[in-house]
Amino acid sequence: MKFRRFIACEAGALLVLLPLVIVGLTLNVSAPGLRWIMNILTIAAAVAAAVIPIVFYAFTPTLPELER
């Protein structure tokens, strides 16, 4: 269950990060406001993609499953 949530969160971060990187590298955006927003969103998505594994596996202990 924890691994599924981890994959879902990581996929969401990558789903935001990859299009922003592709658009940022392929298009020459001349509007400074739009370029600034794209840079901030790209950095935030990259930080989120790097922090998600730490939050899921370093801060929360993995408890053994209960046998029934």
Image (tube, rainbow, N blue to C red):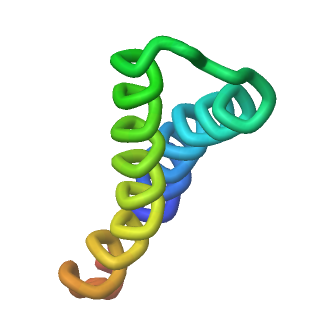
Instruction: Please provide percent x and percent y for residue 49.
Output: 46, 58
Q: Is residue 23 above or below residue 17?
A: above
Q: Residue furthest right?
A: 26
List x then y, in percent, for residue 25: 74, 37
Is 14 located above or below residue 24 in the figure? below
Left or right side of 29 for 26? right
Q: Quadrant of residue 19?
A: top right
Q: Residue at x 19, y 82 (%)?
A: 59
Residue 34, placed above or below residue 6: above
| Number of numbered markers | 0
Instruction: Report which quarter residue 66 is drawn in.
Output: bottom left
Q: Is residue 21 left or right of residue 47?
A: right
Q: Residue at x 37, y 64 (%)?
A: 52
- Decide which of 30, 15 is in the foreground and name it: 30
Q: In the orientation shown, which residue stands out farthest toward the top?
A: 31
Query: Residue 1: x, y in percent?
Result: 43, 57
The residue under the point 34% across, 17% down is 33
Front-most of 1 and 5? 5
Quarter occupied by the C terminus: bottom left
